[in-house]
Image: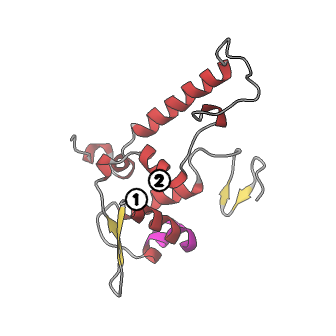
Amino acid sequence: MDKTPGSEIGSIKKIGGNMLITRETDYAIRALRSLSGGEKKTLAQICKEEVVPQQFGYKILKKLAKAEYVSIKRGKDGGYIIADDFNKRTLYDLTKVMENPMDISPCVVPDYICEAHTSDDFPCLVNQKLSAIQMLIEGELKAVNLLSLFKPPETLQEG
């Protein structure tokens, strides 16, 4: 896979390098958006509506079912339906289900041993800055409940 800036990935033009929210999480958001109205839908309906390749859709919906975001009804009249209150789940929760871990650098992982920082006499400024950025990103992701991604603000009820 070509990772150069501006390279084509399927029908999506990739602008930069790695992304914090991966394609898998993006597809999960789309699948949940498709189901956010509360009606049962088949894999084919979800994938067509949200432009998600079916082979990825199946894998993603399986992960979402395991994490109890959706329920699977099997059989002739089978399909997928929302299993949880999106108002209680955040974008952070979803990214952890889909991408665990999602650290911006190995440097911010607890117990990481940095080969470049060999002295305990002073704190590593790189680690301090990256850790602060990591906390800000996590805070922003935790502030977005999934329902707010799918419903206009005026339709959301305070809870």
Q: Residue furthest top?
A: 121
Above or below, 26 relative to 141 = below
Q: Position of residue 59 (x, y in %)?
A: 52, 68
Residue type (three-letter) at the residue carrying disc 1: Ala
| Magenta region | 46-57
| Residue density around tag 1, few if under 14, some if 14–19, many if 20 or more, within 10 Å | some
Q: Quadrant of residue 66?
A: bottom left
Above or below, 132 relative to 137 = above
Q: Residue at x 35, y 48 (%)?
A: 89
Residue type (three-letter) at the residue carrying disc 2: Val
Q: Is residue 110 left or right of residue 40?
A: right
Q: Nearer the viewer, residue 118 or 46?
A: 118
Quadrant in which the N terminus is drawn: bottom right
Q: Residue at x 39, y 37 (%)?
A: 143
Q: Nearer the viewer, residue 107 or 83?
A: 107
Q: Main secondary structure of the magenta part?
A: helix
Mark 2 and mark 1 in contact? Answer it, CB < 8 Å. Answer: yes
Magenta stretch contains residue 48: yes
* CA gap, disc 2 and disc 1: 7 Å
SS label for mark 2: helix
Mark linked to residue 67? 1
Q: Position of residue 137 (x, y in %)?
A: 51, 34
Q: Residue at x 66, y 12 (%)?
A: 122
Above or below, 117 relative to 31 = above
Magenta stretch contains residue 2: no
Q: Nearer the viewer, residue 4 or 73?
A: 73
Q: Earlier in the sequence, mark 2 or mark 1?
A: 1
Q: Residue at x 63, y 46 (%)?
A: 19
Q: Name the residue that disc number 2 marks.
A: 97
Quadrant in which the C terminus is drawn: top left
Q: Is residue 119 left or right of residue 25?
A: right
Q: Position of residue 6 (x, y in %)?
A: 74, 49
